[in-house]
Amino acid sequence: MEEVLLEALKGQIEITRIESLEVKKAARIRNESLQRQLVLLKAQYDACGREKFTLYEQYREAKITAEEYLSGKDELTRKQAALKEQLEESEALYEANQQMSDAASEQQEAVGKMTGLSDAKLREHLYDAVERVLVYDSESIEIIWKFNEVKNGISSYAGAGV
């Protein structure tokens, strides 16, 4: 039974290593996209402030009426409020994505340490890595791994059968 668990552990380490690499890559791509979106939203938000100032100057120089000024200012204020909300949502998404990437990095580091270990060293860690083993019959077992309990939304392969 221990040999089967050892081979399963080796396979699970490889699966987890690949999975954490994919999560990190996806998180990096999403973060790059979110960063571009944040820059664009900030630029639009700042542009509204400049437009308000331009409206005020036009009003002060009597190029537009008070009604036009107030209407334009209100519209720009609403637009700025919507942009600020989008900015906050994007920043929250960016932060959550960064936490997911950090968790994947931690998992990758932990698995990386186990990847190069000899069979003797892996045996020492075998019981630390297995939460429980469910034996269904002589041909079917299910292994629940402890290191699959990864926080922050990284999907896991808990219950990978052997």
Image (spheres, rainbow, N blue to C red):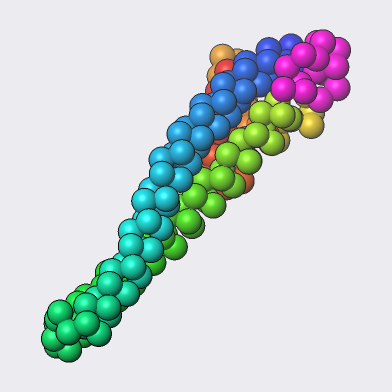
Name the residue rendered at 49%, 50% in the picture. 94
State yes or no: residue 116 in magenta. Answer: yes
Q: Is residue 66 above or below residue 93?
A: below
Write down the quadrant of residue 79 in the picture.
Answer: bottom left
Counting from the top left corner in percent of width and height, residue 158 is at 57, 33
Q: Residue 121 location in percent, x, y?
A: 85, 17
- Residue 17 vs 155, above or below: the answer is above
The one of 46 and 93 positioned closer to us in this rendering: 46
Q: Nearer the viewer, residue 37 or 46?
A: 46
Q: How many marks?
A: 0
Judged left or right of residue 147, residue 120 is right
Q: Residue at x 80, y 14 (%)?
A: 117
Q: Is residue 46 left or right of residue 122?
A: left
Quadrant where the C terminus is found in the figure? top right
Q: Is residue 50 visible?
A: yes
Query: Main SS type for the magenta part?
Result: helix
| Residue for point 40% across, 58% down | 42
- The residue lying toward the viewer, choosing from 145 and 75, is 75
Residue 12 visible somewhere in the drawing: no
The residue depicted at 82 percent of the width and 18 percent of the height is 123
Instruction: Name the image quarter holding residue 74.
Output: bottom left
x and y, in percent, of residue 99 in the image: 59, 47
Q: Which residues are magenta?
A: 112-125
Q: Find residue 103 and report its horizontal and vertical position in percent.
A: 63, 41
Question: Is 133 left or right of 155, judged from the image as shown?
Answer: right
Residue, far front: 61
Quarter of the picture holding the N terminus? top right
Spot the residue most to the bottom. 66
**76 in magenta:** no
Above or below, 83 against 52 in this view is above
Q: Quadrant of residue 50?
A: bottom left
